[in-house]
Amino acid sequence: MQCVISQVIFKQLELVDDEALHRTLFKKMAPPLVTLLSAEPEIQYVALRNINLIVQKYPTILAHEVKVRAVPRCTMPSATSGTHNGLSC
């Protein structure tokens, strides 16, 4: 079932030649795809599989929907440091 969903999207987008229309369709498709990620785990799994396939073919589809923040790099404490209470950031 999950491959069918992404295949239908691919076929429909292949029928559209206008780049401006592609961008408009991407803007309309992206929010519902992201919304599916807040559903129960089974739906999240299927949604992520389909999103992965769609993003592989159209990498910019989620460019304005998903924000990635830099996270400080954390290191594991060494055995000789004397601290055994967790990560050090």
Image (cartoon, rainbow, N blue to C red):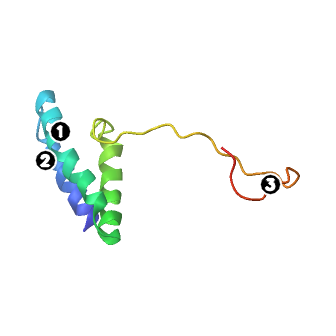
**Up-down: is 81 above or below 24?**
below
Q: CA distance from mark 1 to mark 2?
A: 15 Å
Which residue is the site of mark 3?
A: 83
Mark 2 is surrounded, within 10 Å at the Cα level, by few (under 14), some (14 to 19) or many (20 or more) other residues, namely few
- For this rendering, which residue is in front, 73 or 48? 73
The quadrant the N terminus occupies is bottom left
Q: Quadrant of residue 82?
A: bottom right
Please name which of the two marks, 1 or 3, marks the residue nearer to the observer. 3
Q: Which residue is located at x 35 percent, y 59 percent?
A: 49
Residue 67: image location, x then y, percent: 36, 39
Q: Does the CB distance between marks 1 and 3 fall below 8 Å?
A: no
Q: Residue 80 in the image: x percent, y percent?
A: 88, 52
Could you tell which of marks 1 and 3 lies nearer the N-terminus? 1
Three-letter code, disc 3: Thr
Label drawn at residue 62: none
Task: Check disc 2 and report the residue beneath it.
Answer: 12
Label 1 sits on what residue type? Lys
Element under disc 3: loop
Q: Earlier in the sequence, mark 2 or mark 3?
A: 2
Q: Nearer the viewer, mark 2 or mark 3?
A: 3
Marks 2 and 1: in contact by CB < 8 Å? no
- Kind of residue at badge 2: Gln
Question: Residue 61: percent from the left, percent from the top?
Answer: 27, 39
Q: In the image, is 41 to the left or to the right of 9?
A: right
Task: Answer left or right for 45 relative to 8.
Answer: right
Towards the viewer: 34 or 11: 34
Residue at mark 1 = 27
Could you tell me which secondary element the residue under label 1 belongs to? helix
Q: Residues within 10 Å of mark 3 (few under 14, many from 20)?
A: few
Q: Secondary structure at mark 2?
A: helix
Few, some or many C-alpha atoms within 10 Å of disc 1 (few <14, some 14-19, many ≥20)?
Answer: some
C-alpha gap between disc 2 and disc 3 = 57 Å
